[in-house]
Amino acid sequence: MKKIAMVGVGYVGLVSGTGLADFGNEVVCADIDGKKIDMLNNGQLPIYEPGLLELVEKNVDKGRLKFTTDVESAIRKSEVIFIAVPTPPMDDGGVDLSYVFDVVDRIASAINEFKVVVTKSTVPVGTGDEIKKRLLEKGVDRKLFEVVSNPEFLREGSAVNDFMRPDRVVIGTESEKALEIMRDIYRPLYLIETPIVATDVRTAEMIKYASNAFLATKISFINEIANICERVGADVQVVAKAMGLDGRISSKFLHAGPGFGGSCFPKDTLALTKIAEKAGIKAQIVEAVIDVNKKQRQRILEKLLKFVPKLKGKTIGLLGLSFKPNTDDIRESPAIYIIKEILERGGKVKAYDPEAMDEMRKLFPQVTYVSTSYDALKDVDAMIILTEWNEFRNMDLDFIKSVMKKPIIVDARNIYDPAAVLKKGFLYECVGRSIERIKEKLNVG
Ligand SMILES: NC(=O)c1ccc[n+]([C@@H]2O[C@H](COP(=O)([O-])OP(=O)(O)OC[C@H]3O[C@@H](n4cnc5c(N)ncnc54)[C@H](O)[C@@H]3O)[C@@H](O)[C@H]2O)c1
């Protein structure tokens, strides 16, 4: 059992802080956002994440999990300080480390005894060394700290399970003492035989970028295949399924769609190209992945424009706003691009999402937000399915057709069977399946 401060209580900090408390550690989660901490101290979650509320309540009740805005006191009381603050992109694509360094400076001013300083935020290779240098420059005694990189691989939407049952834990440090302390924190995972990859700080930092860039590559790759499939009359769903059955490939992250979004893949792929550039290397594959991804969301808009060439005065129903299901996170969501384009062309948007409407309202107050998927389709000139929430998978197509002004569906997530939708008389477009060919087979016009 260790005394831990989790600094930054966002998607990663809250889930990992709670998970570490559940492992039996004593965790104080500290954030400068007083509103977030007030919510948490009142038993509410500032984010939507399945299973998290129950786990927070359980560990608060056991007295192992606390929330505070007093970052310095959390640091003073703890032996291990996890940094889980944002690392957003700067205008040039590099990583803004100001939040991380703010925490480092707070550690420098609060440090009273030996601490392990752990980066859980995704940080460029070399940041661990920068942190060490900064602490020394601030006059901190070298014997008072060790630096560790412990990147986080959880996925929003299944974050609790990902944290409690990870595929691996990466611990990067040059210090035996820090490694032992980290092993102790994650001890319960030994019982389920989770592989622990112990390495140096720079390798650990690189593992995170390489992993995210690879997953993003799979998405852009299958989107590229999808675009070819559409032209040559093949079905990307079957192609992806058969590819995924090959254990060397795996079916994960092989779904054609509107491209990746979220708070990680877009910024981490861009950051990796910058890390490479600084090192004198061109990250050609990663650059292509980013480029393909940008074009993919444009392709979804083009599919809409094919049916509704002039959006002025037209209303489009949007189903799904979050960048993926089971989260309220809209950061870099394809929906942001689509809404912006529709509005800029003089169109109107009616939208529904089970969790992400409050977030999207902050960006686009002019959109009409409704409380059911069917309300979002009433009197609209076309609809786009942008996120594959389960509740969109089995809608009553006859009813939808009766309430829409025009029966047009752009299914950016391939959740409907094209033949079934076409047979009902809809105009339909999806990703990576040639509708012309399907129509020919069905003999419909
Ligand atoms: N979201 C994910 O799925 C995910 C997965 C793996 C890794 N990561 C990485 O984890 C890091 C955090 O991401 P996130 O999505 O949890 O961010 P987030 O924006 O949800 O949360 C960050 C929190 O840090 C707080 N904060 C900012 N500066 C602070 C400071 N100086 N002291 C205390 N608190 C401060 C903010 O108020 C906010 O609550 C990023 O580096 C991200 O790349 C994210």
Image (spheres, rainbow, N blue to C red):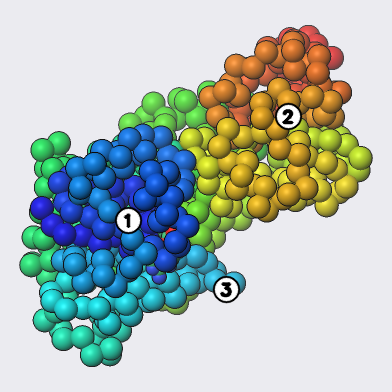
Closer to us: 227 or 395: 395
Instruction: Kindly identify which numbered label has been placed on residue 67.
Output: 1
- Where residue 63 appears, x then y in whole percent? 20, 47
* 436 sits to left or right of 75: right
Judging depth in this view, the residue of 337 and 117 nearest the camera is 117
Name the disc covering residue 376, or none. 2
Of residues 382 and 27, the one nearer the viewer is 27
In the displayed structure, does residue 337 sit left or right of residue 22? right
**Is 354 on the left or on the right of 49, as rendered?**
right
Q: Which residue is drawn at 50% across and 54% down?
A: 263
Which residue is denoted by mark 3 in the rendering?
92
- Tell me what residue is drawn at x 41 percent, y 35 percent: 50
Q: In which quarter of the image is the C terminus?
A: top right
**Tag 1, which secondary structure?**
strand
Q: Distance between the residues labelled 2 and 1?
A: 38 Å
Residue 261 position, x and y percent, is 55, 48
Kind of residue sitting beneath label 1: Phe
What's the residue at 33%, 35% (across, down)?
Answer: 54
- Badge 3 amino acid: Asp
Marks 3 and 1, how far apart in space?
A: 35 Å
Which percent across, then down, holds residue 209?
A: 39, 59
Instruction: Name which residue type carries label 2.
Output: Ala
Label located before the other in sequence (2 or 1): 1
Query: Which residue is found at the position 37% from the left and 64% from the top?
Result: 69
